[in-house]
Image (cartoon, rainbow, N blue to C red):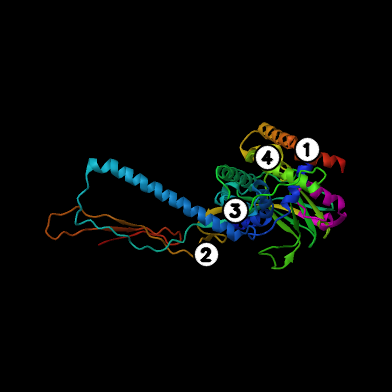
Amino acid sequence: MRDRADFEGYVAQRSARLLRTAYLLCRDWGQAEDLTQTALAKAWLAWRRVRDDPDPYVYRILANTHASWWRRRWRSEIPTGSLPENVLEDPSDGFGVREELRTALAALPAKQRAVLVLRYYADLPDGQIAEILGCSAVTVRSQAARALAKLRVDPAARAAATLGELT
Amino acid sequence: MTNIESELRDLLRQDAERWEGAGGGVTVARVHERVRGIRRRRIGLLGGAAGVGLAVAATLILPVTGVPESTDDTWNGVMSAASSPGYGVASRSKVVLDERFTKMGERVAFDIPRKTDRGNATAMISCPRGAELLYWEDGVYRNALSCAEWLPGTDKKFRGGVNLTVRRGSRFEVAVLPAGSVARLGRTLVTGEDARRVLDLANGGRADMRFRVTDTWIEPCENGPDCTFVDGSTPEPTVTVTVTPSPPKPSPSPSVTITITITPVHPTTGGTGSGGG
């Protein structure tokens, strides 16, 4: 009973933030809810083992489940009712630039995106990110550097950064 | 921090705040529904694997040994038994840290001791009702809460305070702020940077506050005032029945002798009885 109360307290406290993290990983609110519920359900099944510090476990499931979904989706077509619109590439248009940065971010491989989300949104130190993603802190740093380099060479991301300097 | 990093941080925060709430969010009920689904799938997989295992075993064994001939005097059945009360458990707790503090509007640190490795370490923070509380674990911002939590088992009234599960051996920091401090940020408080900004904007103050950490764990038990059984009732004595068939006799109308041994296992009912039939 105590375990259940603890778990329910954890869900009440953390689900909103986990949902937002999941959204940043997959960019789809419906899928983010699915991911978060799956991660929390698995955490409950392992609650006796992880209850002292469930966050790393839950983040790990979020990242791994998303990576496996992403690999599956990558190989399949996504039906859509309308053709996607091209975003204007005018660097003076702040919204458009940000939209491009968003697109560049979404195009990153799942692991690199997870590193950026955990580092810049969840504010986790590299050591903890390494624990979550099952790699070394050096790998986390190199993945982050590669991802940031990709965003920097992306014309839109570079324009966004330049715009940030001007404002 | 480079521009691209700060732009990225802004973008992620902005995107995360755009929750559409289309699916209704994540609730405990939905999570438990998902748990049931996972369990069903696991049982299905287990059943499938067991089926395959049995089929393989049958293929390997049956041709060698052959099918045993059925005997007429074999009786298979399941005897009804008194329902078991389950196991008894007692909840134990011990206060491992109890400190008072008075400063509002700034981070106050507590080192959570690692006295036991059993069960949960729970922190109860008593703070002025309606005040706001931010907390960090090992320097990482975790959450913002209101000091107005329902505390079950107290006097059934709202009291100022929050309950949190904490990690042993960690450094836990809390900042208690006057009501309305988080709203001064002007947007949703999400990141550690937001939390720092809220602290900068908040007023200071003083109040009598307390940070208390309790280790709570469960121990198996058989009796005693704290011992409760899973169904909450006083258990009935459970009996173990052993049936021993007599050796087969060549008479035309065979009789079978069985011995029943009854062993009460509940500690309050001593003695062992036996009978024959």
- Percent from the top left, x then y, of residue B66? 22, 44
Of A81 and B153, which appears nearest the observer?
A81
Which circle marks residue B211 in the picture? Answer: none
- Percent from the top left, x then y, of residue A54? 63, 48
Chain assignment, label 1: A
4 or 1: tag closer to the N-terminus: 4
Mark 4 and mark 2: Cα distance apart in space: 48 Å
Mark 1 on the same chain as mark 3: yes
The residue sitting at 51% across, 53% down in the picture is: B38
The quarter of the picture where residue B30 lies is bottom right
Provide the secondary structure element on which disc 3 rests. Answer: helix
Q: Is residue B122 left or right of residue B270?
A: right
- Percent from the top left, x then y, of residue A120? 73, 43
According to the picture, the residue beneath numbered tag 2 turns out to be B232
Provide the secondary structure element on which disc 4 rests. Answer: helix
1 or 3: tag closer to the N-terminus: 3
According to the picture, the residue beneath numbered tag 1 turns out to be A158
Which residue type carries mark 3?
A: Asp
* Residue A149 visible to the viewer: yes
According to the picture, the residue beneath numbered tag 4 turns out to be A115
Mark 2 and mark 1: Cα distance apart in space: 65 Å
4 or 3: tag closer to the N-terminus: 3
Mark 4 and mark 3: Cα distance apart in space: 21 Å
Q: Which residues are magenta?
A: B183-210
Is B206 magenta? The answer is yes
Chain assignment, label 4: A
**Is B24 above or below relative to B4?**
below
According to the picture, the residue beneath numbered tag 3 turns out to be A34
